[in-house]
Image: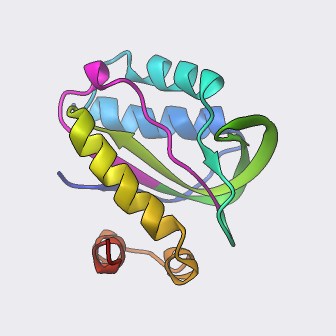
Amino acid sequence: MNDILMMDLTVDTKEQALSAMSSMLINTGYVTPNYMEAILKREQSFPTGLPVQPYGVAVPHADSKHVIESQVVFAALRRPVVFQQMGNDQQDIDVSFIFMLAFRDPTEHLQHVQKLFLCLQDTTFMQQLNQIKKKSHLLQLINNIET
């Protein structure tokens, strides 16, 4: 699995961000053509914004039946966009970073989500995340977090 990075993504809404990221997955053959619709629909019902500090993060994903090959897309947004908070859709979160998860195996999905959530709770990780400009640096940063 090769993580895909979208650095300095310029969008005005979460829908534009999710569409751009989904298009990347569709165009590279990692997900089915209906993945974009599935992820937008899921985000409406089950928001994925996380109020981590100092930058909000979203972790959108769709059902594994839309995934051809497991993949993660990371987007660093030029300007934050509003997502609703996971578990409280009445609370808005200004999101600066998005980790779009596309996993075929639910067990693999759970393992990656657990590791990612550990990373997101680490203030140093979040500060370093803001400095990432290359995929190799992001992967090194994630792999250095102890689980």
On the image, the x and y values in percent for residue 136 come to: 28, 74
Residue at x 41%, y 60% (from the top left corner):
116
Is residue 104 shown above or below 83?
A: above
Q: Give residue 50's position: percent from left, percent from top.
A: 63, 52
In the image, is 67 to the left or to the right of 77? Answer: left
Q: Is residue 73 magenta?
A: yes
In the rendered image, the quadrant that contains the C terminus is bottom left
- Tell me the magenta residue range: 56-74
The location of residue 48, given as percent across then percent down, is: 59, 40
User: To which quarter of the image does residue 109 belong?
Assistant: top left
- Residue 133 lies in what quarter of the image? bottom left
Q: Is residue 29 above or below residue 1?
A: above
Of residues 41 and 16, the one nearer the viewer is 41
Q: How many marks?
A: 0
Residue 141: where, in percent of width, then height? 36, 78
Task: Name the residue rendered at 35%, 61% in the picture.
Answer: 115
Q: Is residue 67 on the magenta stretch? A: yes
Relative to 14, say whether 41 is above or below: above
Q: Residue at x 56, y 18 (%)?
A: 41
- Residue at x 45% of width, y 40% of height: 21
Question: Is residue 81 shown left or right of residue 127?
Answer: right
